[in-house]
Image (tube, coloured by chain):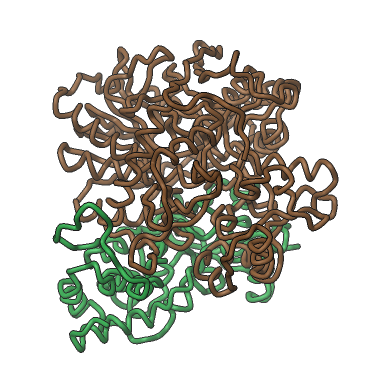
Chain colours: A brown, B green
Amino acid sequence: MVHHHQFDALVVGGGGAGLMAALHASKRVKTAVISKLYPTRSHTGTAQGGIGAALGNMEPDKWEWHAYDTVKGGDFLSDQDAVDIMCKEAIDAVIDLEHLGLPFDRTPDGKISQRRFGGHTNNETKKPVMRACHAADRTGHMILQTLYQNCIKNKVTFFDEFQVIDLLIDDGKCNGVVAVCLATGELHVFHSKGTLLATGGFGKMWKVTSNAHSLTGDLPAAILRRQLPLEDMEFFQFHPTGVYKLGILLSEAARGEGAVFINDKGERFMARYMPTMKDLAPRDICSRYIYKEVREGRGIGGKDYVYLDFRPDQINKYFEEDGNTKRITAEYLETRLPDIIEFSRVYQGVDPITQPVPIQPTAHYAMGGIPTNVDTEVLADASGKTIEGLYAAGEVACVSVHGANRLGTNSLVDLVVFGKIGGIKMADYCERASFRAIKKETAADFAQSQIDVLRNGKGGEDAAKIRKSLQVMMDDNVGVYRTGPGLEAAITHIRELQARYKNVAAKDKGMLWNTDLMEAWELGALLDLAEVTAVSALARQESRGGHFREDFPTRNDADFLKHTFVTVKNGKIELSSKPVTITRYKPEERKY
Amino acid sequence: MKVCLKIKRFNPETDKKPYWKSYELDLEPKDRILDALHEVKWTLDGTLSIRRSCAHGVCGSDAMRINGRNRLACKVFVDDEMAFGKGVITVEPILGLPVIKDMIVDMEPFFAHYRSIMPFLVNDTDPGPRERLQSSEDRVRFDDTTKCILCACCTTSCPSFWARGDYVGPAAIVQAHRFIFDTRDHAAEERLQVLSDPNGLWRCRTVFNCTEACPRGIQVTKAIGEVKDALRTGVIA
């Protein structure tokens, strides 16, 4: 049986962006949050090091510097109007979070404490600046908790453990969503005036990833299936410091506190490549040089990893080399980075206070996603036309502030700033719009057909095996280094897996908490996203930010200073492009 | 290594009552119990249902009773648990909440207790355009209890909670502590009023199961003791 609900506004996803939007929308219009997890399980909670904002609490800083750093970090693919909004609003957003109760660490005079992070600079000296506002190394946890707490305070309506699998799109307008109630297996149609998508990333198409099991790109896939576009899917960030083999993130805050990369020769190799920012160069650059060291035989023991060294005596040695008078102790690190020190101890059996930590790049963050304008309205095509009633914010969206590579801390900035804008814009819309009629009897049909084929399938294919094959292949061919032949092989492989996927049948035929069936559905989403990722990557014959083509190793602004739009129509992938918005910062070579 | 995983299974659509089922697996010693459960689910029996997300001890989804102790399945390892369980690893749902299917329990009673203690900052004064100031000493005062991930390991390891599901439970008291001892907050008295209920703070019998179970290393019993002191003396220090 299909259940029906009606709300003015829907928020899909209960992470930072979703809760921020819900807090603002629910003050004005009847709002519901629909999340496949309990909101406090969302991946925002795993963000560690900090949220960037030019508060200037520690040393001089300006939001314009933050904006320039973001554009340069994004290898000049960011839309600069959106970047200006984000970096300017970041200051008030962080202050708002403090007022909402977020327990930031404090300076000696009681202000919000800030620390260094990759790619964040004093634009005049070119040196690292202390911009990342932090609560130990669980800043994301504290943001998620604080926002959830305030949603409870404001009595926001939640549909927890409801998984959205389809959007109601009619005549270029969005009228709501269809979700599976995980507890009962039944479908629920949510009819709305406005819908905001905030479901985060989709890193589970790779094997070595920092992403949660739940990050399977459900809504971007639903967008594709409704013949709407995704933007810049070739740009996926590989974070340089994942726990070797597991991919669990060790925050860039470690390097912000002074940690360095070390190769098999004991050399601090980033100083050779990026003489000013060194180990605090942006993530795309560090990941590439880690693998360059590995390829040239300087991985640890000749293997595919290097060390992250944050032994206090080593940090102090490098501080001295850099002319930095700061000195740190083991106790200091235990207070500033307690979680990542524990991750290393628990998951690697390595104590970072006394031993260097084996790390390798890990698939981390989607710069691309559902295209929006600066008001978070979802775009129908590359011309800028919008889907009435549909909004997106946070990692799932591509506004685009991160361009070709996101700077550390900017994910949290993005989700609080654009989550808030989204909530306000959606509420504005809901106040002036009326409900559009939907055909209740057939609204759930497309979702139902997707579930039925998996539940009733008789084929012998196994979702777990296909998923594993996809993830291993994506690591090999659509990773830090890419080539034309590698990407072509990837596309062929993905299409073979898609053909096999048609014969996947869920082994669990039940209704209640059928996670087997939902995982199979999620695999379909991952396959569709992997395909458009590889196709977009093949078409971009240049190297920019997180997308590095060995066969086209330089940036090519003449041909590729543009966003990629990808759609799937009648089974065929179509690419188009949208110009980059450039205001104050002219593209230049990226040096650190 | 060879691993024997004994899982308490229950599917309300097919089973009258829960039963134990054993699975023989070949795993790496440092695979997590979550990896072992995925191995069962992805190679032997797709009907096994668990909650999980981040897989590194931060999201709080996969609390379960492993070898009789409440743990996050993603934060304990098969070699350690094989040694502790003397050749067998038992996995069952956390106790004291209604079982829905396999490891999945109804978390709503847990979250209702959480909501009851007003888990949000209350301060109606105008903060002005910049952050409220707070000294590092005042900030550190409640640092430990800010680590809580609401996994329910503590509450569902507590004999008082097993005996009476009405008991607000350690997790909710930890959350109350996080606000009561925050100098920016103005609702300590109201929270203490809630906790002075017969099903509040005093049902804690200082068994320390909660502290032992907390995957975040929070000194739960100590925090409860500090809230008891505040209620008893009326002094928040």
Depth check: give the residue in front, B132 or A299. Answer: B132
Count of numbered labels shown in the rendering = 0
Placement of A203 over or under B48, stated as above or below: above
Tell me the residue at 20%/89% (across/down).
Answer: B233
Placement of B56 over or under A2, stated as above or below: below
User: Residue A116 at what x, y percent from top left?
Assistant: 51, 54
- Would residue A265 be found to the left or right of residue A32 on screen? right
Residue A184: tell me if it is visible: no
- Would residue B156 be found to the left or right of residue B228 on screen? right
User: Residue A349 at what x, y percent from top left?
Assistant: 68, 67
Tell me the residue at 54%/36% (across/down).
Answer: A73
Placement of A314 over or under A120, stated as above or below: below
User: Residue B40 at what x, y percent from top left?
Assistant: 62, 52
Rendered-image quadrant of the C terminus of chain B: bottom left
Depth check: give the residue in front, B64 or B190. Answer: B190
- Would residue A592 be found to the left or right of residue A444 on screen? right
Rendered-image quadrant of the N terminus of chain B: bottom right
The picture quadrant where one finds residue A544 is top right
Tell me the residue at 16%/23% (across/down).
Answer: A433
